[in-house]
Amino acid sequence: MTAVLRITGALSLGLMAVLGRAVILLMHMLRHSHVVVKRFPLFVQQLYAIGVLTLPIIIVAAIFVGMVLGLQGYNTLVDYGAESSLGLLVALSLTRELGPVLGALLFAGRAGAALTAEIGLMKATEQLAGMEMMAVDPIYRILAPRFLAGVLALPLLVALFNVVGIYGGHVVGVEMLGINASAYWSGMQQGVDFYNDVLNGVVKSFVFGFVISWIAVFQGYDASPTSEGVSRATTMTVVASSLLVLGLDFVLTSLMF
Amino acid sequence: MTSSLELVEISDLHFSWQDRVVLDGISLSIPRGKVTVIMGPSGTGKTTLLQLIGGRLRPASGIVLVDGHSVPDVSRSALFELRKRMGMLFQNGALLTDLSVFENVAFPLREHSELPGPVIRQLVLMKLHLVGLRGARDMMPAQLSGGMARRVALARAIVMDPMMVMYDEPFTGLDPISRGVILKLIRSLNDNLGITSLVVTHDVNEALSIADNIFLLSNGHVVASGSPDELMASSSEEVSQFMQGKPEGPVHFHYPADDYIDDLFGVQP
């Protein structure tokens, strides 16, 4: 019994310590957020590494998600003679849920893991310590630009995910299964509300981008400086951010809709 | 700015990692313009001492003065100002792997100065020429040998014209030629640029050939200090064990353990 208590206590204390360090790091990064203006090229470079290089996986995934939505939606709707609402169904599913959530999960696996591994290895090879000794703050020079680029990159990626997904639905619904193209688009136009659907999706993707980038940067910075430590931190980034995205999605959805 | 003869003054310095005492009341002073070597077995806190001087660690108690500033007490921005005047050479070089040799050496200038590109180029090439690697400016750190990486790191450490360079195990893991090159560089930088040099090493021969002054550390204490000749002539057992590399002496071969026979045949816990 005491053993159980002791383990629970140790685990919660450890968790609290990690949370504390993570929040302190976040505060430092936000305090240094003027790096975006002062060192704009650094920010752009990270936006490229985090955002542009994640584009291929996002586009390919979005095409298939859109096509599957088109196929499944058509098969269900056609029984009720409502296949003309396919456009609305695809667009609502993507903007409200699938775009932000799937985009975030892919982002965590591709960009989040890469961020953690990069920063963890910089720590393990004393590059961060070396920078400190050169009077350069690694939180300013390395962490803050990456974090802020991640926060901005995910909403942009999700917007693209939605557009490409809607096109994927069009390919299957209109071009393969023969739904009227104007019905596909006009249903979407009438049924999708900008504030309720599109903007809420954007808010979600901002929250997810914030959480994933924060976890990824923190895990790299907090990793123990060994190959095992970096591997553990990378795993932790993907697991923790995926679970948090799914959990937060429920919370946000219940608040928004 | 004070102009005392000592650049770094340390007195009664204590430091512990969790419950392991690393430095147990160390006092030493490092004169300006000289090569000072800190020697001792692995794990006696030599590198920790450098980290304390550089302000990356905080001592439990004691005084660390660098050029008259108390390192543990200065503000963060003052510490960063102080660090701009201290170069540090890490054991593996700690080069930024995503930047070329040229950009690595240019890094401190680009971060701390508003110098125009052509001036930076000249400064970087001058420092690279000093370490003999002007021709390697376009290589990436992964393409460099261990000795070359350390020389690039040295060029980077002196690019801001610091008052002092700290070398953390500069000879470890190098071939004899590279060792000779590093030895020559430390000496010539010290004499020609007037940089105070602080070398941490456990290589006795290299230390003897380069040092103006040696401090021998063991178990968190300074056990001996003086010129190389004085240390070689020392009659202390601790000093002669280290200087001559004897396996037995005041430092035992066996890590502290329970009685051997009991451990093998006694009751298992």
Image (cartoon, coloured by chain):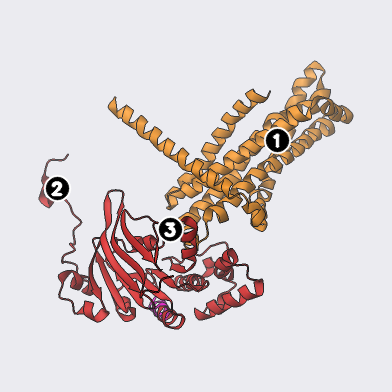
Chain colours: A orange, B red
Q: Is residue B94 visible?
A: no
Residue at the extreme front of the image, as rendered: B2
Badge 2, how many Cα within 10 Å: few under 14, some, many 20+? few
- The residue drawn where x is 62% and y is 40% is A209
Is residue B65 positioned above or below B151 on the image? above
Residue B194 at what x, y percent from top left? 44, 79
Residue A218 at what x, y percent from top left? 51, 45
The quadrant holding residue A12 is: top left
Left or right of B252 in this view: A179: right
In this rendering, which labeled residue sits more in front, label 2 or label 1? 1
Q: Amino acid at mark 1?
A: Val
Is residue A250 positioned above or below A110 on the image? above
Residue for badge 3 = B74
Left or right of A182 in this view: A194: left
The quadrant holding residue B268 is: top left
Which numbered circle lies on residue B263?
Answer: 2
Q: Amino acid at mark 3?
A: Val
In this rendering, which labeled residue sits more in front, label 3 or label 2? 3
- Label 1–label 3 contact, CB within 8 A: no
Residue for badge 1 = A202
Q: Chain of mark 3?
A: B
